[in-house]
Amino acid sequence: MINVVVWEEYNYVLLGVQFRKEYAHEIDKRLPPDDPARAEWAKDAPLFEEIFADYETNLIKVSTLEELDAVIENCDYLVVHKQRLTPEVLRKGKKIRLLQHMGEDYRGIPMDTAREMGIPVCATPLINYIAVAEHAWTLMLNYFKQTREQERQMKERLYVERGWGATVPNVRIVQDYTLGLLGFGEIARPMAKYAHAFEMKCIYWDKVRFPELEEKYHIQYVEWDELFKQSDVLSVHIPIMPATEKIIGVREIGLMKPNAYFINTARGKLVDQVALVDALQNRRIAGAGLDVMYEEPLPVDDPLQKLNEDPSYNVTLTSHSAWQGHWTHIRDSLNIFLNIYRHLHGDPLQYEVT
C-alpha cells in the first residue's frame, strides 16, 4: 500500500484530478457547448485513480499540522500546498520518499531537514497563478492605455470625425510609473518580471523579505506604508485569513496617490470595500481593477456596479475569473501527481529543488 498524504486547506491539489468526476457539471453550466475547454475538462481530465491504476494507493487528506502529525509516520509521498511544515513533524516521516510542494514558493518547507533525511523536494510552478498574474497585468494595461475609452470612441465613430491621433485623454507610458506589489509570492513574482520587461520600477512589501530574489526580479523592498505612498499601481497578492481580513482599510487607501490605480486579484475580503468605494466615488484614487469582491457574486445593486458602468471612474470588474485558462487546475494537479508517478517508475523528477 502506497500512502499519499495531501496537506492543504482548500482543494487545489486534488481539484484537477477530481474534476471530471466532481466538477464537470459546473463547466457544463458555465461554458458554451462549443468551447474546447468544456469538452476536454469533461472527457479527458484524468482522475487520481486512473493515474495510479497499477498501484494500490491510499489517499489521505489533512488540513492541519496536527492531522498531518497523526499520519506522517506511514506517509510515502507528502504533498503540501501553502503550509508551514515544521522540522519536528517532518522528522517523524521516516518513510517519505518524495516531498512535493504545489507552487514554486516553497518557503514553508524545512529544506535543511529534508536534505538531512535524504528526501527529494520538488516545487512545481502553478499555471493557475500565471493566469492570475496575466489577468492583473491586463487590468493595469487597460487602465494605462484607456482601452474602454478607446473602444467607446470607435463605437461612437469619433475616429471618423476627428481622424487619427491624440483623441484619448489620460493615456500613459508604463515605464514612467511604479508598480507596488503587496505580497511577493508566486503570483507577484511574474508581475515583477513583466514590470522589468516594460522597464517599469517595481517595489514590494511582504511579511518576509526576500533579499536573494530582489536582484533576480529587479525589485526593491519597502515598508508597508511606503508601498501605499510610492505606488502608482498597487496590486494585491496576499492570502486571506482572519488576521488579514480588511487589512487594506481607510488608512491604507488614504496613503495612496490621487492618480494611483488599485488592483485586487487575490481576495475581496482583504479590502474594506466601503472605504475603497468611497475613495473611488470621490476620486481620491484614479481607479481600480477588481477580479474579487467582498461579497461574491457581487450584488446587482452594489455601488461598485455603477462605478464599473461609468468609464470616467476607471473601474473595471471581472467575475473572479482571473485563474481561467486552458486546463489551469488540471495541469497544476498533473504536475504534482505525475511527478509521484515518475518517482514510482524510477524516472527523473521535474522541478526538483537543489
Image: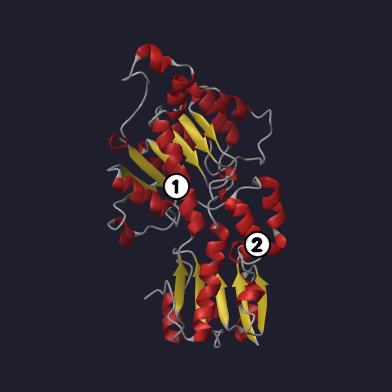
Name the amino acid, label 1: Glu
Q: Extreme front residue here?
A: 34
Query: Can residue 194 be seen from the camera position used here?
Result: yes
Residue at image mark 1: 134
Q: Quadrant of the N terminus?
A: bottom right
In the figure, 227 relative to 42: above or below? above
Where is residue 39 drawn, in percent x and y? Answer: 63, 55
Q: What residue is at 37 percent from the left and 35 percent from the top? A: 232
Q: What residue is at 67 percent from the left and 62 percent from the top? A: 20
Name the amino acid, label 2: Lys
Query: Can residue 67 be seen from the camera position used here?
Result: no
Q: What residue is at 64 percent from the left and 67 percent from the top? A: 63
Residue at image mark 2: 43
Task: Measure the alpha-carbon separation of dots 1 and 2.
Answer: 27 Å
Assign a secondary structure to mark 1. helix
Which of the 4 quarters of the picture holds residue 161?
Answer: top left
Where is residue 16 drawn, in percent x and y? Answer: 60, 63
Q: What residue is at 54 percent from the left and 53 percent from the top? A: 239
Q: Nearer the viewer, mark 1 or mark 2?
A: 2
Where is residue 280 drawn, in percent x and y? Answer: 51, 27
In the figure, 292 relative to 339: above or below? above
Where is residue 180 drawn, in percent x and y? Answer: 38, 43
Assign a secondary structure to mark 2. helix
> Residue 167 — which label?
none
